Amino acid sequence: MRYPDKIIAPLPAGWIKRMEAVLSEDEDKTDLLREAVMRELERREAMPARERTKPKPD
């Protein structure tokens, strides 16, 4: 299995259409999500732990 970890992520209304509008022809929505999550993980892992803040629940 290429991606054994799975999540269900509720998204605000309209986000799927926005994602579909910017995807290239051979790109999948999950590709876009993986890239965004990877960038954010790298950004947060690079900062000192004391500067990291936990996201506030909606």
Image (cartoon, rainbow, N blue to C red):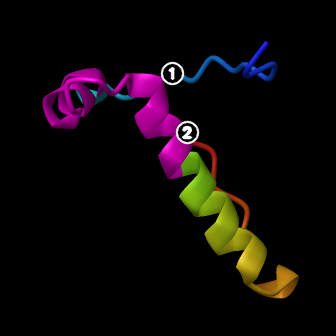
Could one spot residue 52 in this view of the protein?
A: no
Report how far apart the C-alphas of labels 2 and 1 lie in the structure: 15 Å
The reply to whether callout 2 and callout 1 are in contact (CB within 8 Å) is: no
Q: Locate residue 16 relative to residue 35 in the image: left or right.
A: left
Task: Quadrant for the C terminus, please.
Answer: top right
> Label 2: few (<14), some or many (≥20) within 10 Å?
few
Residue bearing mark 1: 10
**Numbered label attached to residue 34:** 2
Asked whether residue 32 appears in the rendered view, the answer is yes
- Front residue (pair 23, 53): 23
Q: Position of residue 30 (x, y in %)?
A: 48, 26
State the residue at coordinates (73%, 84%): 47
Which x, y percent locates residue 32? 41, 37
Q: Tag 2, which secondary structure?
A: helix
Q: Residue furthest left?
A: 21
- Most foreground residue, 8 or 36: 36
Vertical placement of residue 4 versus 23, above or below: above
Residue 3, percent across and down?
Answer: 73, 22
| Identity of the residue drawn at 18% across and 37% down | 22
Up/down of 7 relative to 31, above or below:
above
Residue 41: quadrant of the picture: bottom right
Please name the amino acid that badge 1 sits on: Pro
In terms of secondary structure, what is the magenta stretch mainly?
A: helix
In this view, the residue farthest toward the right is 49
Q: How many C-alpha atoms fall within 10 Å of the one at disc 1: few (<14), some, or many (≥20)?
A: few
What's under tag 2, amino acid-wise?
Arg
Indicate the secondary structure of the residue bearing disc 1.
loop
For the magenta stretch, what is the residue range?
Answer: 16-36
Q: Quadrant of the N terminus?
A: top right
